């Protein structure tokens, strides 16, 4: 298991909790950058995601496979918990973070490769998932954090993960500040350029501070992988 990614997740947990702890209930009712979701919806979703990943990890350690949200409608649960006041959401967030970190701290090295149902991956893949969730949704909270703060490692990871959204195109992604490019298709002719962060942000379906540029309009993005 890449301990550096685990450390990033812990740091992102601290940052998120610090951000949420400073908000009043009225602040949480304000719109996020996600259509139809308030900031409270984003925070509630991140708490549910943490619990889901903790449950899948614990089950994998017992040799079991469980769904991320086995108890029913995820969206209904998010709607319910987004109605909490600021104190309730802070408590839920802190509890969810602690539960996930305790579970991951107890995983033996050999168990990181145990399978989980989530995207047919492994327990180690859940850590990368959490990293993406935290970085992207912290941006979605619209509290001053932007993609320009993303590390080169996160940008490369996110582009790797989201590259299938360009499947069917003939595209080469050229980040100006990273030491690699990404090609899609057998003979990519269409070039899309920008910072690594702007390319990752665009692939994630968000609007970066500065849009990537290319030969004509940007390619349409396919579904989330």
Image: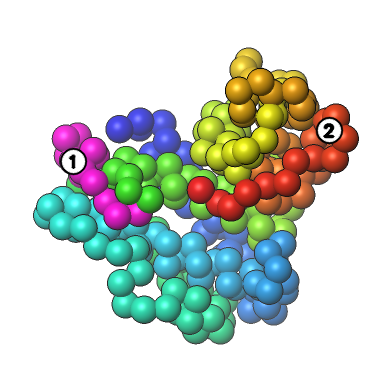
Q: Quadrant of residue 85?
A: bottom right
Q: Which mark is residue 213?
A: 2
Per the image, label 1 sits on a secondary structure element best described as helix
Q: Taking 82 as reference, is 151 above or below it?
A: above
Residue that mark 1 sits on: 111
Is 108 covered by the magenta stretch? yes
Q: Taking 37 as reference, is 60 above or below it?
A: above
Q: Residue at x 62, y 38 (%)?
A: 168
Residue farthest to the left?
A: 62
Q: Colour scheme used in the picture? A: rainbow
The residue lying toward the viewer, choosing from 193 and 90, is 193
First in sequence: mark 1 vs mark 2: 1
Q: Quadrant of residue 212?
A: top right
Per the image, label 2 sits on a secondary structure element best described as strand
Q: Position of residue 87 (x, y in %)?
A: 52, 77
The residue stretch that appears in magenta = 107-118
| Horizontal side of residue 195 vs 102, given as left or right | right
| Horizontal side of residue 127 vs 150, given as left or right | left
């Amino acid at each position: 298991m890449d301990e550096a990614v685990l450390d990033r997740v812990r740091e992102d947990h601290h940052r998120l909790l610090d951000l949420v702890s400073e908000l009043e209930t009225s602040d949480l009712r304000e719109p996020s950058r996600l259509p139809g979701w308030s900031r409270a919806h984003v925070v509630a979703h991140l708490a549910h995601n943490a619990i889901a990943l903790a449950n899948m990890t614990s089950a994998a350690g017992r040799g079991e496979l469980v769904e991320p949200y086995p108890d029913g409608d995820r969206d209904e649960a998010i709607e319910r918990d987004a109605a909490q006041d600021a104190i309730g959401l802070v408590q839920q967030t802190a509890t969810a973070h602690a539960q996930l970190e305790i579970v991951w701290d107890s995983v033996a090295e050999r168990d990181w490769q145990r399978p989980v149902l989530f995207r047919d991956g492994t327990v180690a893949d859940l850590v990368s998932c959490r990293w993406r969730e935290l970085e992207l949704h912290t941006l979605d909270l619209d509290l001053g954090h932007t993609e320009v703060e993303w590390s080169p490692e996160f940008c490369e990871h996110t582009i790797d993960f989201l590259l299938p959204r360009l499947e069917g195109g003939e595209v080469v992604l050229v980040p100006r500040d990273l030491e690699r490019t990404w090609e899609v298709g057998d003979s990519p002719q269409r070039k899309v350029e920008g910072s690594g962060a702007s390319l990752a942000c665009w692939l994630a379906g968000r609007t970066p501070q500065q849009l990537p540029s290319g030969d004509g309009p940007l390619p349409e993005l396919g579904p989330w992988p």
